[in-house]
Image (cartoon, helix red, strand yellow):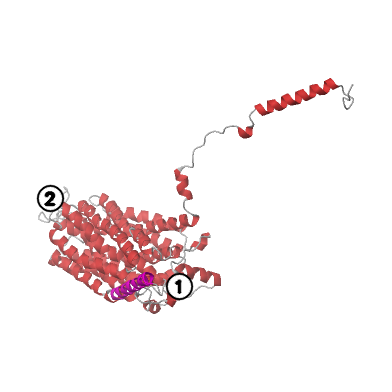
Amino acid sequence: MGLAGAGQPAGHLNHSRQCRGLCRLRTLRRPSSRYRPRKMRSSLAPGVWFLRAFSRDSWFRGFILLLTFLIYACYHMSRKPISIVKSRLHQNCSELVRPGNDTHDPNDTTWCSWSPFDKDDYKELLGAVDNAFLVAYAIGMFISGIFGERLPLRYYLSAGMVLSGLFTSLFGLGYFWNIHMLWYFVLIQICNGLVQTTGWPSVVTCVGNWFGKGKRGFIMGIWNSHTSVGNILGSLIAGVWVNQQWGLSFIVPGIITAIMGIVTFLFLIEYPEDVDCTPPQHHGDPEKERDNPEDPANGPYSHRESNVDIAVSSSKEQGTEPEAISFLGALKIPGVIEFSLCLLFAKLVSYTFLYWLPLYISNVAHFSAKEAGDLSTLFDVGGIIGGIMAGLISDYTNSRATTCCIMLILAAPMMFLYNYVGQSGIASSIVMLIICGVLVNGPYALITTAVSADLGTHESLKGNAKALSTVTAIIDGTGSIGAALGPLLAGLISPTGWNNVFYMLISADVLACLLLCRLVYKEILAWKLSRSRSSGSSLALTHPR
């Protein structure tokens, strides 16, 4: 008898071995949870893929671009109603039914107009109301940039929007309060013009802090469509009530603007560093640009530019705040004077269309106030297209001045044709209004955005990011002088005939083009130098030594 082991019988051991073998077999047959087939899962949702495609910095930049877009669209929305309501303040009442308690003379054809604009000099009075706003805006713009450099942009911009909404609403309340004194409307316009100067330097500075120079023309071309979008919204909102209670044409945009001011206070971010975002990188090396001042890639006046973001980061690293640039110091930056004077005449043309186009359409084409206001929005639709086109072309060619000059040259004959054949039919009017909007607002949009940001980050500023607000204020402030002159001259000239108004606009357009000749010449020289360098490098590759 063999040894069973541990005092156990051999039969018991054999039975134990058989049990272990059977359990092992069952284990092999039973599928492990580790190898069980899993339930089919869908792929990641397309919307989530889209959200993950952009970095945190990109989302913040997009948010700032959208917020500043809405901010300035509200500013322009609150300016537009006066041009729509003009034809309601003074209208031909001969076809309307008089109320039973009417005390006007039976032969009076302006009994339904709003005093004091019911007299024969109504165009001069309406021009005075426009000019009160625009002169105050032009004067205030030069001061606004100085304040914008020294005050937090969020507080400055929020206060300006709330006050702008208040004064816009007060103009409309004149209807419900039955106010017929000219000084009331002029005073409201002066106050509104002053507070609206808080907008442009602030939003351009904010966008300049978040976006570098690369693709700046294209980005700001799209962003600058807020001007036309605001004009369109203002026209459509004002048109709803213009034939009934025209005061609401001002009150509703005013309330929207004030609400947007509160949103600005809650959400505006001035610098990427405030939310731990990375400042945008400059597309070129500043040291290399200084070593190659004739490099055409840097442009005739942009080769000495530095990035505002580098300035911000360097100033924060050193822990010291740069001093604000003086007014004369900003004027010494190459290109500031030329572009400022060019914008004076370009904005003269644009703002004359802005304030007088609905009345012109109403008088010449005999449309109602609402129909004329709706048709005038096509000029702003063209402005959106023109701003984007100007930005794309100037980015591709690196020629801001040449792009502006070509569009201004084409605008002159188009305005002449619009005056003579534009009202011959609704189709021709639509097409020519859009084309005029493209050519008139394209240079205006480019100068006030990309050019202002380029010049505001000039290397001669030695990294002083605070100069952007002052440079922007100088350029747009000078342009605002033209914006004030245009509607004023239109009000004075229009009694002699609308043809003379268009001759004035064409003359201003030509002057704007001539003021850019020196910068265009520099850009052409830079382009020739670039061609000669590229041909030289190709010859070197073809015939190596």
Amino acid carrying label 2: it is Glu
Q: Residue 374: horizontal and vertical position, in percent? A: 23, 52
Any part of residue 191 in sight: no
Q: Position of residue 397 (x, y in %)?
A: 32, 66
Residue 104 shown left or right of residue 457 in the figure: left
Q: Quadrant of residue 437 in the image? A: bottom left
Is 531 contained in the magenta span?
yes
The stretch of residues the image draws in magenta is: 520-543
Q: Is residue 44 magenta?
A: no
Q: Position of residue 445 (x, y in %)?
A: 31, 64
Q: Is residue 310 visible?
A: yes
Quarter of the figure with residue 480: bottom left
Question: For the stretch drawn in magenta, what is the main secondary structure?
Answer: helix
Residue on which the image places disc 2: 95
Task: Give the residue at mark 1.
Answer: 286
Label 2 sits on a secondary structure element that is loop
Which amino acid does the dot numbered 1 rest on? Pro
Contact (CB < 8 A) between labels 1 and 2? no
Q: Residues within 10 Å of mark 2 (few under 14, many from 20)?
A: few
> Which quadrant is the N terminus positioned in?
top right
* Alpha carbons under labels 1 and 2: distance apart: 69 Å
Reply above or below: 374 against 408. above
Classify mark 1: helix, strand or loop: helix
